[in-house]
Image (cartoon, rainbow, N blue to C red):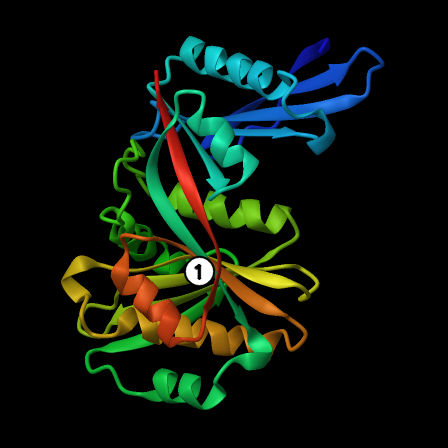
Amino acid sequence: MSFHLTPLADPEPGASSRRLAWLATGADGVPLGSAFLRLFTKEGQEHLAELEVAVHGAERRQGVGTGLLEAAVAAAKTEGRRSVIAQSVLGSPGDLFLAARGFRRVLSLTYARLPLADADLKMLDALVERPCPGYRLTRWEGTVPPERARSFADSRRAMDDMPMEGTDFGTVVWDVERVVAAAEAVARRGELLYTVATVEESTGEVVGFSELVVPGDGLGDGQHYGTAVLPEHRGRGLARWMKAASIRSARERHPELAGLCTDTADGNAPMLAVNDALGYVPTHRAVEYQLDL
């Protein structure tokens, strides 16, 4: 099949990455597919690129996807990247496509959803109201308050030991600038960012957090962006405490919100257990692939 690739570039780089893109069109100029290559730019991840390839269902198996992938991989090499990662739903055409082109499976993920109409309100109330000696919850909407910014940024290291199996993900280095930029990016999309955090009473420091992003109109599904507790404070039920508070707050603030979605690495047994206990129902599984350059 004859097609043409047009290279593109995102004119507005993000706080931690920039994107390249390619559009595949047929001889008649009709779009056939696209590819996006996210190039991470922050310290600890300059070796990494993330790929998304999409081809219209009727145009598959004609070399369009392969052409898009080859263009993106060539660009990643030119940019000096060591690894390219890509994600696909388990058993989907994309799953088979990546496996057949040199990518290897490095991580399995379970996606789950909590229908808010089915949420166990009594259980949530009991979890949120139960005492956790030495700790208290705090909340904010949007950008972290200045007085919490440094402590919150420091608490992000709670994600450093998140199970990533064989993924060459690098280390995400968080500082106040990056925390603020991430919140501002959510706001620019017209979405709402809510954070529930655990504060250690003896120090006043943030030791855990749970982030939730909700559509600006309060409809559809919200998305959990991460729940984590610093290693030295684990084993006290703080993750469940925060996530329960996040669910209850979302239901109260947005009564028409349909559900909350989350994704968790299959190797993260503690968080899978938290999701199960709170009523999240698995919807599908995905696979993270990696190509070593």
Left or right: where does residue 218 sit relative to residue 231?
right
Classify 56 as above or below 134.
above
Q: Quadrant of residue 208?
A: bottom left
Q: Is residue 74 visible?
A: yes
Position in image of residue 51 (x %, y %): 49, 28
Residue 230 in the figure: left or right of residue 118: left
Q: Residue at x 35, y 62 (%)?
A: 209
The residue under the point 62% across, 55% down is 191
Q: Amino acid at mark 1?
A: Glu
Q: Residues within 10 Å of mark 1 (few under 14, many from 20)?
A: many
Indicate the position of residue 155 as horizontal and vertical percent values: 28, 55
Which residue position is annotated with label 1? 211
Residue 103 placement: quadrant:
top left
Q: Is residue 221 left or right of residue 57?
A: left
**Percent of width and height locating residue 264:** 38, 55
In the picture, which quadrant includes the C terminus?
top left
Assign a secondary structure to mark 1. strand
Residue in front for this viewpoint, 143 or 53: 53
| 14 to 272, vertically: above or below | above
Please say whether residue 39 is visible from this viewpoint: no
Relative to 94, 240 lies left or right:
left
Closer to the camera, 30 or 191? 30
- Quarter of the figure that contains the N terminus: top right
In front of the other: 71 or 197: 71
Above or below, 290 against 161 in this view is: above
- Residue 101 place in picture, x, y as percent: 44, 20
* Residue displayed at 33% across by 43% down: 174
* Count of numbered tags: 1
